[in-house]
Structures are given as structure tokens and as C-alpha cells.
Image (cartoon, rainbow, N blue to C red):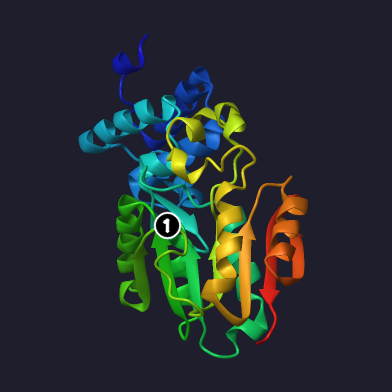
Amino acid sequence: MSRSRTPQPATARAAVEALRQTMMAAGVDEAREKAEWAVAHLLAVGRLDLRLRAEQTLSPSQGKRWTAIRDRLAAHEPLQYVLGETEFYGRRFASDARALIPRPETEELVSLALQRRPLWRRPPRVADIGTGSGAMAVTLALERPTATVIATDLSAAALALARENARRHGAEDRIEWLLGDLLDEVSPASLDAIVTNLPYVRHGEIARLERQIRDYEPLGALDGGPDGLRLIRRLIAQAPRALRRPGWLFLEIAENQGDETRALLEQAGFIGIEIARDAAGHERFALGRLERA
């Protein structure tokens, strides 16, 4: 029986099970977890509360929405795009195909920056370069209210999404928004820190990414060129001009780019360079600072 002719489930429990089976048949990973998140979203409850609503009857409108969700998930569309939101640093952010889905590793990047106490001793100017959904910029603005945060992106559509997320959290007026390529629109010696998650996937590896990433997330936010460092290399070279002294640079990188990134930072004059690991034990972050003037 085709998906379009599958009857709409009557209860929340049945909705989860039917969605799980459909996704498993389509080869979608983590089918159970995604089905639970989807039905919880449909009922406007938390996933942990879903068991208490297991026998709740779906309304006709919920049944129609369930069908649309089922078809999109079975086509391997990311859950975050289907639901229209994702969680980052304990907050909910709008999420759609205008920008890369914020991931847990990027939360760790934010934490690395927030833990650098010397950076926050005075109200700093911190830039999120290639802000995408705006999750990092908004988080930094909310976690450090005395800071001035700048958010840049080459994509007008991504920048619009970032501003929507800032409005959602009451932070739009606390962030300076710049449309442009990397640091081109940033004044010289105007920043105390740069925090960025630029594209770092090697071009040749794009075709091997999971279908839900490769087919749905914006290619420009993934493709880092032949060695994955095309934009990272440019940013590191530009950073000393944009940063005051002392100044900090925090980068998310691929797990096999630590040595190359360290060399690029050294060539640009950064000291105190660290290649840090993520929660899974992979080299994932590079950070360095410029000496005092």
C-alpha cells in the first residue's frame, strides 16, 4: 500500500508507530526517535510527555498535518526542517532550508568562547562570521548581555532567518547585521573576537554525506572546497586586520584539519593556539589569539 493511501492514525501511539514503520521502510535513520519528536511537536508537548498522551485522539487537522510530516520525513528531509525549529543551547530556533541546521558541536564552540574569561573582562565586540540561522550570534548576545555582537553572512536569505531568530529571543536590536563576504564589511581593528563555523567539508566528500544533509541543507554552507579549508584559510588571513590586540579567533573544523589549521594560524601571527576535541573525542575546534599591541 502506498504512503498516500495509508489511513491516518487515530491516536498518538498509532501515529508514532505508523511514522516509525514508514521511515524504516524508507531507510531513514533513528526512525523511532524522529517519530516521537514529530508526534510530540504535532501535539505541542515535550517528547517525554508523549507517553502520557499515548491514547489521545488526533483531530482531523492534526491527521492532515501528520500525513504531510510523514511524507516529508520519508523523503529523508531533516526533522528540523520538517518541524520548522531546532534546539540550540537550551533555546528553540527557527530552522529551514535557508541555513545549515545548528549542531551540538557548534554549541561546544560557543562554550569554548564563553569560557575564555579574559575575553569577557570588558564588554567586547564579538563577530559570528557566516551566521546562518543566527544561533551562535543570538546565544552569545543572550549569554553575555554586555557584549556587542556582529553577525555576517553572504546569503541574504540566511541573514533574514537569523534576524527572525533574534526577534524570537528579543535580541535583534542587540546585534549588528552585515551582508557580505567573510570580514569584508567589518572595520579594521574593530573586533575583540571572531567565532565562526564556516564550511569545512571537502568538495569530494559532499556526495558521500547522508542524504538528509546532501539533498536538503544549503550546499554553500557545507562545501569547503578541495581541501575543506577554502574559506577558513581566507578568514584566518583576514582576521589580524579586523581584530584588536589582544584578539581571539574560534573556529569549528573537520576532525582531520587540525594540523593544517594550526599552521595557518601560526602563519597569520596567532599564538596560544589550541586544537580542541569535541564530546565524541574528535579534533573539532581551533583557537588562537593575537598578542597585545
Instruction: Tell me what residue is drawn at x 51 percent, y 28 percent.
Output: 211
From where the camera sits, is residue 108 visible? no
Q: Position of residue 92 (x, y in %)?
A: 42, 59
Q: Relative to 79, does residue 85 appear above or below in the rendering?
A: below
Instruction: Tell me what residue is drawn at x 29 percent, y 37 percent.
Output: 58
Q: Position of residue 273 (x, y in %)?
A: 75, 67
Q: Quadrant of residue 179?
A: bottom left
From where the camera sits, is residue 126 visible? yes
Depth check, front residue: 53 or 2: 2
Residue corresponding to mark 1:
181
Q: Relative to 259, does residue 77 appear above or below in the rendering?
A: above
Q: Amino acid at mark 1?
A: Asp
Q: Position of residue 128 (x, y in %)?
A: 48, 65
Q: Relative to 113, does residue 283 appear above or below in the rendering?
A: above
Most extreme residue toward the bottom, as rendered?
122
Report whether 169 appears left or right of 90.
Answer: left
Q: Secondary structure at mark 1?
A: loop
Q: Quadrant of residue 53?
A: top left
Depth check, front residue: 277 or 80: 277
Most extreme residue toward the top, as rendered?
1
Q: Quadrant of residue 167?
A: bottom left
